[in-house]
Amino acid sequence: MTSDQTFVIVGASLAGAKAAETLRAEGFDGRVLLIGAEEQRPYERPPLSKDYLRGELEREKVYVHSEGFYAEQDIELSLGRTAVGLNADTSEVVLEDGERLRYDKLLLATGAEPRSLAIPGGELDGILYLRSVEDSDALRERLERSSALAVIGAGWIGAEVAASARQRGLEVSVIDPLSVPLERVLGAEVGAVYRGLHVDHGVKMLMGTGVESIEGATAVERVRTGDGREIACDLVVVGVGVAPRTALGEQAGLAVDNGILVDDRLQTSVPGVFAAGDVANAHHPFYGERIRVEHWANALHQGPAAARAMLGKGGAYDRLPYFFSDQYDVGMEYAGHARAWDRVVFRGDPATREFIAFWLVEDRVVAGMNVNVWDVIDPIQRLIRERVAVDDRRLADPDVPLDDLVPAGAA
Ligand SMILES: Cc1cc2nc3c(=O)[nH]c(=O)nc-3n(C[C@H](O)[C@H](O)[C@H](O)COP(=O)(O)OP(=O)(O)OC[C@H]3O[C@@H](n4cnc5c(N)ncnc54)[C@H](O)[C@@H]3O)c2cc1C
């Protein structure tokens, strides 16, 4: 059908790899070029702050596909090659070595990169960031020969690295200007559960203060906080968020605002050019607004959705945002999207670290999180998606099955 067409995917990570896989699964028999700046074939990042970082998971287990998959599927995987130019008028991608690739359809799956911390001492040896498998290898090697880690930033990466480092026996301090870890997403009440979890595992939680400087002769020796404390350490991990890699989109004149703007079919402002994963700020039909999601499940599902859209198939991408995290022996899943809420209702006692939290606006659940409680994410998603009017007492009562709160016949 389309055998003379070339589809180029820039970014060979989860979103890009799943898009390439889907193009073939949907029967596309033209050329598929998957271009990746990293030397590794596409891999998953969640283990990099968890079991892989702790040396409990072998490298082979992090890859998205087996080594032979790309050749078997006739996907031209080109690694260690960075796209440095995009001309949407001539439909060309330019690689670092000057090669020009003409495309019929293009997918930008360039992801995100860690924000760096511009403070005095930021160039000292022993300050690490975590995004790639090489970053995780380097951090694991440092964890083996360091005794005290300071984590700057108590978001997901910071919290998971802190947990892994404690499990490896290091002294760990976490510093963040907010009052509890993960406050931006979870709010103060639920963030406090994670604060307690880390404190119970012996982490020093320095909340409500920033970092003024990192000090040492040539390598890190201490971190100085905004409120005047000195934290002795021989290793620093910075986890202060990520920025979408939008450079190609900007260069080509695509609409960009906190990511590459795409519609609900993941098409950018230029027809034939699509974006998916961490880099895409996508119009979400359920929320009626644009959302950029920096989570694994979004890359996993948007990649295939973009591939189908490139083929003129499939409908609007309207999955509810979903993510997970594991810290110590506490696992959680979160579904939905809550920028603001009236209150949080707990089913189960948060102090036991086995509970479900619901974020509500008026009588509607806008997000839910199950902590060490499993097989409930489907009814949680149905409550959100069906915009069910709920009664707080029934929502909180573990004797009322969640399914009973969703009207019969709801999807
Ligand atoms: C340590 C860590 C732990 C995480 N844990 C969780 C978790 O527990 N739960 C969860 O839901 N999410 C987690 N995430 C987030 C999740 O991994 C990301 O959402 C996901 O990787 C996004 O995939 P992506 O394909 O959109 O982008 P990325 O994974 O960022 O990949 C983009 C790829 O594009 C390449 N690229 C960029 N620009 C170019 C260019 N110009 N030319 C060629 N190639 C280019 C990059 O090198 C990269 O390989 C974690 C992330 C990290 C870093």
Image (spheres, rainbow, N blue to C red):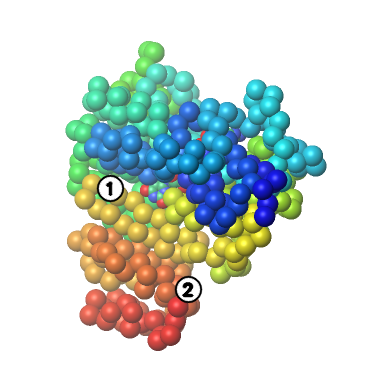
Q: Badge 1: few (under 14), some or many (20 or more) residues near its Cα, within 10 Å? A: many
Answer with left or right where residue 403 lies relative to residue 243.
left
**CA separation in Å, label 2 and label 1:** 28 Å
Tell me which amino acid carries mark 1: Gln
Tell me which amino acid carries mark 2: Arg
Q: Horizontal and vertical percent for residue 57? A: 27, 38
Q: Secondary structure at mark 1?
A: strand
Residue occupied by mark 2: 385
Residue 242 in sight here? no
Answer with left or right where residue 264 lies relative to residue 302.
right
Q: Badge 2: few (under 14), some or many (20 or more) residues near its Cα, within 10 Å? A: many
Q: Residue furthest right?
A: 89
Q: Which tag is nearer the camera, tag 2 or tag 1?
A: 2
Quadrant of the image containing the C terminus: bottom left
Q: Quadrant of residue 31?
A: top right
Number of the label disc, if any, that sits on residue 173: none
Q: Is residue 329 above or below residue 48?
A: below
Q: Is residue 367 above or below residue 58?
A: below
